[in-house]
Image (tube, coloured by chain):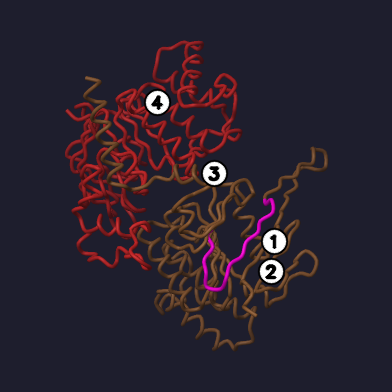
Chain colours: A brown, B red
Amino acid sequence: MSEPPVLETRGIVRDYVSGGGFGARRVVRALKGIDLKVERGKTLAVVGESGCGKSTLARIITMIDPPTGGTLLIEGREVDIARHGVSREMRRKVQIVFQNPYGSLNPRQKIGDVLSEPLKLNTDFSAGDRRDRAMAMLLKVGLRPEHFNRYPHMFSGGQRQRIAIARAVMVHPVLLVLDEPVSALDLSVQAQILNLLQDLQDEFSLTYVFISHDLSVVRHVADDVMVMNKGEAVEYRSRDDIFAAPEHPYTRTLFAATPIIDPARIRARVEAKATRAVAGQ
Amino acid sequence: MALLEVRNLSVSFETAAGRFFAVQGIDLSVDRGEVLAIVGESGSGKSVAMLAVMGLLPPTATVTADALRFEGRDLLAMSARERRGMSGSEMAMIFQEPVASLNPCFTVGFQIEETLERHTDLDRAARRARAVELLAAVGIPEPEERLRSFPHQMSGGQCQRVMIAIATACNPKLLIADEPTTALDVTIQKQILDLLLRLQAEHGMGLVLITHDMGVVAETADRVIVQYNGRKMEDTDVLSLFERPQNPYTRALLSALPENARGGRLPTVSDFAPGGAA
């Protein structure tokens, strides 16, 4: 039999309840039945605007929050954290990298400790072993040996994101959830981080769920793309199909609103403005 | 005569490690009716240069320039009082975080009328009428009711519209927008950019758009200045920037765009001679 997909969800629903007590109880359905499937070594990009539920989905896949309904399968095994909790082994398999590299590192922890802590919690390696592995990972993500004993505030945003990625990969996960990993970074740094993610994916056959609102980044990294709006997957197809011919009206709106760099369009815009200026005089 | 003329502008800060230059010898000019985009990565000094033009830098900043002129008037020779009289009326600025730019304790109507009270002779009723007119002009539905709203009762996009209403309340000749859409979703970004360009065209304003987004530059600017490490790298029309970038840093920046990737890997700025950029 062929290998099960690394990640599969069936009809994932998530409700958030507010109020109660003296106020009126209100239920917000943040996810309205999400089905998805990602094979080993592939990247699924989840695209949508704020409030569409993409980060809620990330929390459920990472087993931080339980879904209200539906099934989550990691490597074909069902996970039900609400009823059975999660084993340490499952926790190891799925790791997450957040958007803000300033907020996701403990300011009082040296980088060497940031990287070896996941091993301390998840493995039986000796202290010396952990140190060696942390150092090796530090070098792999493009940092230098002297960075080992430094604190997070001594690094730039791009370097901190490298550290956050290194920490996530330390325990050899099968699935990495990347929640807007390059949104806070400058263009040139963004390119470096995207290259690093690609190298790591090739080396460790990592599977990515890449959450982003930036369509040009998505087009660069994704195999499949899921467009979300108001808790629903309005369109979910291969990258080439979706960029060639977006079908759902919301996808089209999103694509149309995204600024693009096209010399022919720039020329048309500049000429139209010049014509208006002449007509106005 | 250019609307805004800046020659050899430098801004420095005294730090423990010595004097730090955030902006070094920038020349720029903006004409009436022109959209100038200033592009650069964080730390390139693009915001600091414009804050210096507005006179909004803290006293710890040292601003020097051979010329800093607005409609031919020397801004450096003016008193702080005169500068304050100009900002908000003849030149105005909006910022990246619209929700943080508004005062949470006052209604948006109060905050629009405050600007009108400071800079015009309109009486209370006329100010109220003008505030309604401004909210309608920036595309806020039911403007009379919305005057009584507090910033937290509005979305980020609506708050930015209110900021634009305040900034354009006195029909400024120059509007500086510092990353006005960076905190907003793309569909809202498009609405805000369309609004800025419409107001700019209607009033013949000069518009300076500070951004890091090359797509926004391509869709809005007439002319573009690229900044890096406080220095000007390139100053050109928008079409030439994308078709024939002259400076190595500009070329590096454009090739780092994911949409320009050929095959798998993205070239990064460090792949290019770093000495060429500085």
**Mark 4 element type:** loop
Q: Position of residue A56 (x, y in %)?
A: 64, 55
Which one is in front in this view, the residue at disc 4 or the one at disc 3? 3
Q: CA distance from mark 1 to mark 3?
A: 23 Å
- Which is nearer the N-term, disc 2 or disc 1? 1
Residue A250: mark in rendering: 3
Q: Which residue is mark 4?
A: B168
Tags 4 and 3 both on a single chain: no
Q: Quadrant of the N terminus of chain B?
A: top left
Residue at the spot 19% in from the left edge and 30% down from the top edge: B2
Which one is in front in this view, the residue at disc 4 or the one at disc 1? 1
- Magenta-colored span: A31-45
Circles 4 and 1 in contact, beta carbons < 8 Å: no
Q: CA distance from mark 2 to mark 4?
A: 54 Å
Mark 2 belongs to chain: A
Residue A73: mark in rendering: 2
Q: CA distance from mark 2 to mark 1?
A: 8 Å
Q: Which residue is at the far right?
A: A21
